[in-house]
Image: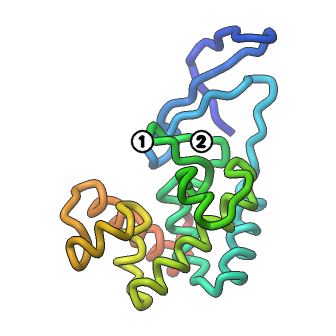
Amino acid sequence: MFFTNIKPITVGNGYKSIKIIKYGSNSNAVSLSPAYNLKFHNKPEIDAFLKEAAQTYNLDYKLLKAVALTESDLTHNVVSEKGAVGVMQLLPKTADRFGVRDIKNLEENIKGGAKYLKFLLEMFNNNSKFAVAAYNAGENSILKYNGVPPYPETQKYINKVFAFYKKLSNNEKIF
């Protein structure tokens, strides 16, 4: 559940809209949604989709969840400033590339992100650090630098993913 002290504004059709800024670890995440028509998915539902996708694509569930936590804090209705959408923060081009028809659909978004992560792991011979860096910076950046690119954002991203991964591996509470 999210709370805000931002006053809703009235937009077309009489809907009230709120802009939720920086809820969770993804500081670039924003959402603009009708206040009386919000659909937030609960964490257990998201977790079930993550487990299913991990099994479907033979992924380490904890790694997939760590990426999702880093991308969106497991928040479904989120769009970044760059246009990345959903729990897995898929860009429309990436979603198309991996067969996602409805990027805003929770299950499709998670499956698309899992499929992309699996592709990256295979591309980089199961090097999870390279795959995670590529999830953030794109696979061409990894190829260009023959490893993790020197981008501060990507370095921070990798550290955050693996911090979550460690907590998940040690059964530590995330929220």
Query: Which residue is depicted at the point 20% across and 73% down?
Result: 145
Residue 156's spot in the image, x, y percent?
30, 59
* Left or right of residue 55: residue 22: left
Callout 1 secondary element: loop
* Left or right of residue 53: residue 19: left
Give the labeled residue for mark 1: 27
Query: Which residue is depicted at the point 56% across and 17% down?
Result: 6
Give the labeled residue for mark 2: 78
Q: Find the distance from the CA under tag 2 to the CA under tag 1.
A: 11 Å
Where, by quadrant of the figure, is residue 132 drawn? bottom left
Residue 2's spot in the image, x, y percent?
64, 35
Q: Residue furthest bottom?
A: 125
Callout 2 crowding tier (Cα within 10 Å): few <14, some 14–19, many ≥20? many
Query: Which residue is depicted at the point 47% across and 77% down?
Result: 120
* Picture quarter with the N terminus: top right
Of the pair 103 and 110, the residue shown nearer to us: 103
* Residue type at tag 2: Val
Name the image colouring: rainbow
